[in-house]
Structure formats: C-alpha cells, structure tokens
Amino acid sequence: MHEHLESIYHDLKLKYPYQKEYLQSVLEFFESINNVLLEDPKIIESNVIRNIVEPDRIITFKVPWVDDKGKNRFNTGYRVQFNQALGPYKGGIRFTPNVNESVLKFLGFEQTFKNSLTGLPLGGGKGGSDFNPKNKSDAELLRFCQSFMIELHRHLGPTLDVPAGDIGVSQKAIGYMFGMYKRLTHAHHGSFTGKGTNYGGSLGRTEATGYGIIYMTLAALDKYFNTDLKNITIIISGSGNVALHTAYKAKQMGANVVAMSSIDGVIYHPQGIDVALLEHIKEHNQLIEVYLERYPNAVFSKDTKKIWEIPCEIALPCATENELELEDVKKLVKNGLKMLVEGANMPTTLDATHYLLEHNILFIPGKAANAGGVSVSGLEMQQNALHTSWTFETVDNKLKEIMTKLFNSIYETAKSYDKPFDLVSGANILSFKRIYQAMLDQGL
Ligand code: NDP
Ligand code: 2IT
C-alpha cells in the first residue's frame, strides 16, 4: 500500500480503534487505489483521501418510545451523512440491535461509492437505530418510527437527504416514518424512497436490488464465460427482501437455487427452493424450518454456516456483513465455486475476498452488484420530481440498462489497469475517480 494511504489508515486506526467494520471498508478501498495515486500527484497534494474517508456529519439522538405494556423504552438513532459531492445524501435506514456508529459509517462509505457507480446524481448516507423490530406489535413499530422521525425529519429533504429501507426496515416502517415526516414538515415530497406505490413509491423498487444482482450476474457470465444462468446451481444466504427477489429472478432465468437461509438456519433443497413458500413463511414470521412440512425431503440445519458447505457454481451472499469468512470460502472453492456475487453490503471478510481473487473466482463486490436498489430509488426520486409514475416494465428496463452499463464500466476500468478479472479494483477506482473529480471541481 502507498505510504500516503498507510499513514491515513494508521491515523484512522488510532482515532477509531473500535470501529472494525468501518476500518475494514476503508482498507478494502485503499488496497485498490495505489495505481491511481501514482498517476495523479494532485490526489496527495489535495489531501482528498483524508477528506473522502470521513463522513460530512453524524447525527446521533435518543429515541424514547412506549411499549405495549406502558413501559418507557429508549434506543439510539443515527444518520451518517457521508458525502454529497454528486448529489443529496442517499441511503437506507437499518433497524437491528447491532447498529452502531461503526456499522453505519461502513455502510455510508460503501453507499457513497455505490451511488457514484450508478451514474445517477446521488451522494451517500446511511442511518438507523439499535431498535429490534422483531416481535414488536404494529403499534410499537408505529410509536418507535414516529419518535425516530421527530428528531430525524429536520435533517432530511428531497434535495438534502433521502433515506430508504435496509435490514429490518419494511415498507410498513417506511410508511410510518414518511407519514410522520409529512406531519412535521407540512410537505409531501420525495424525501423517502421505497414508499408504497399508492403514495408515491415506484413500481419495481421492492424487486430492484435482487433483480439488479441477477442482471449484473448475467452480464458478467456473458462477458467472462459466454454463458447464462440456465441449469447453474446457486446458493443464496438470507431470505429477506434482497435474497427473495434474487432467488425469484435467478429461477426465472433458469438457475437452480438449492439453498437459502435466515438467522434461524439453512434449508437445502436440491430439487430447487420453493421461493414463494419461503416468502410466505417469512411473511408470517415463522421459523424457516416450517419449510419441511411441505417438503420433508429438504434438509434443515440450525447452523447458518452450513450453507457454505453446499456445492454450487455461484454463491450469492444476501444477508449481512462479514457472513462469509475465510474458512467458508475455502469450502466453496473446494466444492467447485466459479463466481461469487455480493448481494449484501460487505458480506465477505477481507481475507476471504483475497482468497477468492487469488483462486481466480470471479468476484463482484456489493457496491456494484447490489446497486439496483438505490438505482430504482433514484428513479423513484425522478418520478416524484416529475409528479408521475412509470410502469413496472419501464422501471425494470431502466434498471437492466443501469446494471449492464455499470458492469461494463467497472469491467473496462479493471481492464484499463491490467486487471481484467479484478472487479473490486474496477469498482473502487471508477467510483473514486468520479467522486474525487466532483469534489475537486467544487473546491472539495
Ligand atoms: P431484510 O431485513 O429484508 O433481510 C435480511 C435477511 O438476512 C433476513 O432473512 C435475515 O434473517 C437474514 N440474516 C441476517 N443475518 C443472518 C445470518 N447471520 N445468517 C443468515 N441469515 C441472516 O434485509 P435486506 O434483504 O433488505 O438486506 C440484506 C442485505 O442487503 C443487507 O446487507 C443490506 O444492507 C443489503 N442491501 C439491501 C438493499 C435493499 O434495497 N433492501 C439494497 C442494497 C443492499 P431473518 O429472516 O431470520 O431475520
Ligand atoms: O444498501 C443499499 O443500497 C440500500 N439499502 C438501498 C438504499 C436506497 O437508498 O435505496
């Protein structure tokens, strides 16, 4: 690593010693951009890297709410407004007990680069709370979301900061937050995406991340292997929004999705997962194991790690960060893995990513592969600004176009740096150059 990057990383480690996810995402980025530093001395002179790795601001606040038993509860709310060089801050809101500043800084950092790859005028941000939406009544969720918005609304706006959903934030929660936002601001404008289609949401936003992952996978399969998804064996971790729509589209394209998972375990069904059944199970908040009542020959394991032991040609981690560790990818490679596409944000640890690249496994990083969600969020903002709504087909075609163009642009970038197989570098270099130039042009 270039000494300039080493010195910045050293300082970040001293300043934020416990922010392991954030440091990991910065290090992954630094490992890719040595060559760019060497070709443009202005990067060091302008000190842009020190600037780009720190968020513009972090808003932290207390969220008091009352549970159904009348007991006062408190959570912490955050919004990390990372970078607005290319447009308003844009990125999801996550509600899980492990949300903290490090997790949201890593997500905001990734989002900034991801959004730049889409080619849309979007900056990067992320927010959320350590609130756990599981096993909460509707009334509790409503009270929490309203209290969360009492503080957050003043930091949002269609040209300022536009949140969406992420883990643990359903369309219902978005509706509750948006409803409160409107009461507090007296304005109905597109300051949230992922809204219900009956009050300003875009058709195709629910499906967008998963469909986009498959559009990109198809573009890569075509470019590198001159093939498609027919009869390809796939495993997909998770069974939330991203995993389910990835699975639907993969099956539609002729792939055999043999395993999926959730926090409570893994289902292995060699004949092909019944995705609609799995969606039904999750919608009714049941354990994934219930799948066996309909398909007694499928195999269930409580150990979520078991999914990585299942032989497949393509693995699509679509659950959460760092779910794939070195030992897991070693098993996948031993069992014939050809390609790994990150559906979640940073699901692969750094040493596991190195292992995959060293073993010539085609690897598409999340900031490229899962950009379909935020892309359709960008399209939702466009529709809101125009006071119109497009058909599902229009949105889906635009999504396809964005994902294919995105893939081609990171492939061409990787190739121009003599690393045609290294799409991590392709994505990091291209997105960095776009943000850097915009920052420079605007006086940083
Ligand atoms: P959801 O909350 O809808 O789903 C998350 C899923 O992951 C759930 O099925 C959950 O299980 C499962 N899960 C969590 N931890 C584990 C684990 N350790 N092992 C196995 N399964 C696990 O979230 P999303 O689908 O929206 O998000 C998934 C990932 O995609 C996240 O990394 C998110 O940041 C990223 N992403 C999301 C986008 C979006 O548009 N929603 C866009 C781009 C990226 P359970 O059902 O038991 O809770
Ligand atoms: O990680 C992500 O890209 C998202 N959660 C979606 C962000 C968005 O603003 O649609």
Image: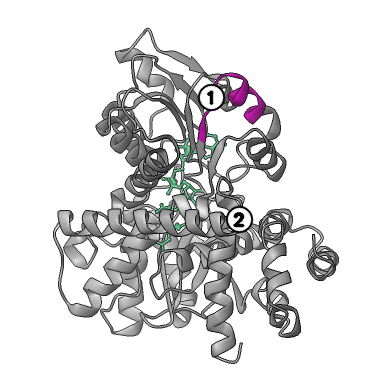
The answer to whether residue 177 is visible is: yes
Asked whether disc 2 touches disc 1, contact meaning CB atoms under 8 Å apart, the reply is no
Q: Does label 1 point to a residue whose CB lies under 8 Å from ligand 1?
A: yes
- For the residue labelled by badge 1, is the local secondary structure a helix, a strand or a loop? helix
Amino acid type, callout 2: Ser
Residue range of the region highlighted in magenta in the rendering: 328-339
Residue drawn 60% across the image and 38% down it: 323
Q: Label 2, label 1: how many angstroms apart (C-alpha)?
A: 28 Å
- Residue 431: say if magenta: no
Query: Is residue 20 left or right of 81 when viewed as pictured?
Result: right
Viewer-closest of 288 and 141: 288
Q: Position of residue 70 (x, y in %)?
A: 47, 56
Compared to 428, does 356 lie above or below? above
Q: Which residue is mark 1?
A: 307
Q: Position of residue 230 (x, y in %)?
A: 31, 27
The answer to whether residue 130 is visible is: no
Compared to 86, does 196 lie above or below? above
Residue drawn 41% across the image and 43% down it: 223
Which label was assigned to residue 174? Answer: none
Q: Quadrant of the N terminus?
A: bottom right
Query: Is residue 167 left or right of 175 when viewed as pictured?
Result: right
Q: Position of residue 224 (x, y in %)?
A: 45, 39
Query: Is residue 328 left or right of 441 when viewed as pictured?
Result: right
